Amino acid sequence: MRSVKRRDGFEGQRMISLPEAVWRNAIDANPIIGQLYITHIGYFPRAAFHYRERKYGCTDNILLYCVKGKGWYSVNDRHFEMGLNQFVIIPATRAHLRYGSDDKNPWTIYWVHFSGKDMDSFNRGFNIGLLDGPRHIHSNETGIQLWDMMYQSLKMGFGQENMGKANLCLYHFVSSFLYPEKEYAEENEARNRIDGTIKHMQQHLSVTLTVEELAQQCELSPSHFSTLFKKATGMSPLNYFIHLKLQKACLLLYTTDMKIKDVAVAIGYDDPYHFSRLFKKTMHISPEQYRGLRRKEELAG
């Protein structure tokens, strides 16, 4: 058992806590800030005996990023260990939270508390769960740079410009953890192949492409190619190709007076009725109605 426990107070630490009135005033001045905003931000280097207990949880999301040493956190009776190049986003909760550094090898952490208008939806949308456990991340230099930008902006004062800059950086900061840069050369190579496939798709929107043809271009088996493609884009290759086609159709419908059947042919569909059904199924509006949106805007001036 450790004999000393500290909430904060570490040599070289940096920390700013924003009073509730500060961010409420900032939201009143610019309501868009209320979508996602910083409430506390800090950096604890080699934080020996760091310990924090929140018996009734926290109304903010808490992001902890360990860049040296080790630590831990617990949610009710679930215990998690954290080490070098690991992070966790603990969603806003009423559960009993505790976290602290390892006794022998105390962690160095960057941390941010952030909140927003609808954090439940935010956390569901980005699959942030209470018991996810820490995630490994390659050294996140981008995240650290963004943390420093947020900290320096707030350090200069809580004026509207500083608050706006810091909170816009927050989006990029969080995304650098949720969507980190690939750390392995083979993963980068796979991503480059997928990017090349997408460019090929964009250049051949008027034809029909098969998974086999696309996989062959990447020198991969169809199954391996499909797995890599879905991992990189969240969609199957053919569904992605269809969305690119419909994106082009939207552009043609909105910026030209081409007939619907000609738009269909331009993106590889000889049957205009099939095109219209596909367009409406995906866009939830018919091609004619989509074109009508442009005319309404023109009449509106």
Image (cartoon, rainbow, N blue to C red):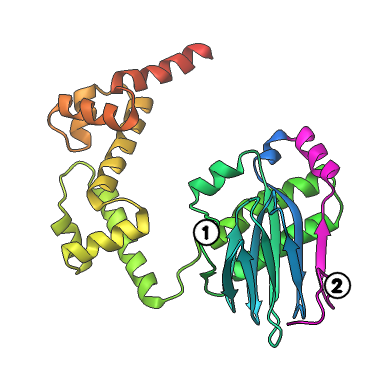
Q: Which residue is mark 2?
A: 9
Between residues 155 and 65, which one lies in front from this camera angle? 65
Rendering coords of residue 143 (x, y %):
62, 65
Quadrant of the image occupied by residue 79: bottom right
Say which amino acid is labelled 2.
Gly
Using the image, determine if residue 216 lies above or below residue 296: below
Q: Which mark is residue 249?
A: none
Residue 119 visible? The answer is yes
Disc 2 is placed on an element classified as loop
Marks 2, 1: nearer the viewer: 2
User: In the rendered view of the protein, which quadrant contains the N terminus?
Assistant: bottom right
Rendering coords of residue 152 (x, y %):
79, 60
Say which amino acid is labelled 1.
Leu
Residue at position x 16%, y 44% from top?
207
Residue 196 visible? The answer is no
Residue at position x 55%, y 56% from top?
130
Rendering coords of residue 121 (x, y %):
54, 41
Using the image, determine if residue 145 lies above or below residue 236: below
Q: Provide the residue span drawn in magenta.
A: 1-30
Whether residue 5 appears in magenta in the rendering, the answer is yes
Rendering coords of residue 73 (x, y %):
63, 69
Residues at marks 2 and 1, CA–CA distance in whole angstroms: 29 Å
Q: How many marks?
A: 2
- 287 vs 165, left or right, is left
Quadrant of the image occupied by residue 229: bottom left
Using the image, determine if residue 32 lies above or below residue 186: above
Residue at position x 62%, y 58% from top?
173
Using the image, determine if residue 300 lies above or below residue 123: above
Q: Which residue is mark 1?
A: 178
Disc 1 is placed on an element classified as helix
Q: Callout 1: 10 Å neighbours few (<14), some, many (20+)? A: some
Residue at position x 87%, y 52% from top?
157
